[in-house]
Amino acid sequence: MKPIQITIDEKEIKCSNGETLLWIALDHGIYIPHLCMSREMAEPHGACRLCFVELEGVDWPVTACTTKAKEKMVINTKGPMALRLARTAFELTLSNHPVDCAHCLKRGSCELPKIARHLGVKLRTKKFKKFLRDRPIDETSPVLIYDPNKCVLCGRCVWYCQEKLNTRSIGFAYRGFQRWVTTFNDEPVGLSEYGDRVELAEICPVGAFVAKTRRDSKSRINEIRRMNHDNHRREYPCDCEGRVGGH
């Protein structure tokens, strides 16, 4: 198939017609924030709302993960409307995420600091009221640690289990701020069909799923528990408002 030519941030790029804009940009060194998308996904679901871009001739920003390349398309990843939407979506995500990077097992590989730097947003944003979960860390798996309090609801783990492993033993439960990723019947991760799948730690973009590879993992888990508790008490000193979920 004859390649087409598009322009991203004033950079002329040759690509295939119908190729996803997100991957074209990333493959050519143009970063677009994203959490929910994986190259292996047959159909993107645009859940994180972070990959907004502006198209010449189109009034409103579009998501790069759901938009296909067309001949002579002109894309601006840094347009004011696109950045405003992405920043708002990211700040909403952070409002439901405990920020304790120094103690996180995913420190150094978490996607959130990179996105924050790109968007010019502080991780400890105060734009939206905090609604932190207060759920126990699950370490029943021999290879995984699951901290549901750090989940950003990107859906990558759900997609992997349902599409790659052909099991629906993991999925989203509830709605709104009570929405979270859990197992069928809320059974421990170690008893589920995916409990021995260390790949989930590689797929997870944050510190929700991490691999049990560190020798000091037990002490780090206890430290995370303490930090989660401190974060929750700091946000809700009376423990009477803003609590999402529970034991």
Image (spheres, rainbow, N blue to C red):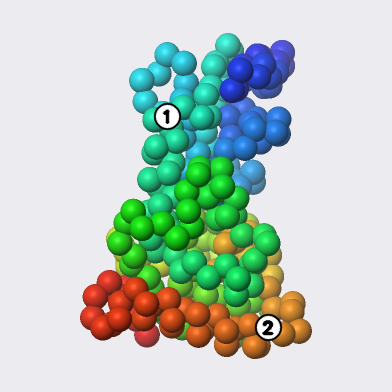
The residue at the point 52 percent across, 75 percent down is: 147
For disc 1, the marked residue is 80
> Looking at numbered disc 1 in the image, what kind of residue is underneath it?
Pro
Secondary structure of the residue carrying numbered label 2? helix
The residue at the point 44 percent across, 65 percent down is: 97
Foreground: disc 2 or disc 1: 1
For disc 2, the marked residue is 217
Q: Residue furthest left?
A: 240
Q: Residues within 10 Å of mark 1 (few under 14, many from 20)?
A: few
Q: Is residue 175 left or right of residue 161?
A: left
Compute the Cα span from label 2 to label 1: 43 Å
Q: Is residue 110 above or below residue 238?
A: above
Residue 242 picture location, percent across and down: 27, 72
Q: Is residue 47 visible?
A: no
Q: Is residue 122 left or right of residue 60?
A: right
The residue at the point 53 percent across, 70 percent down is: 100
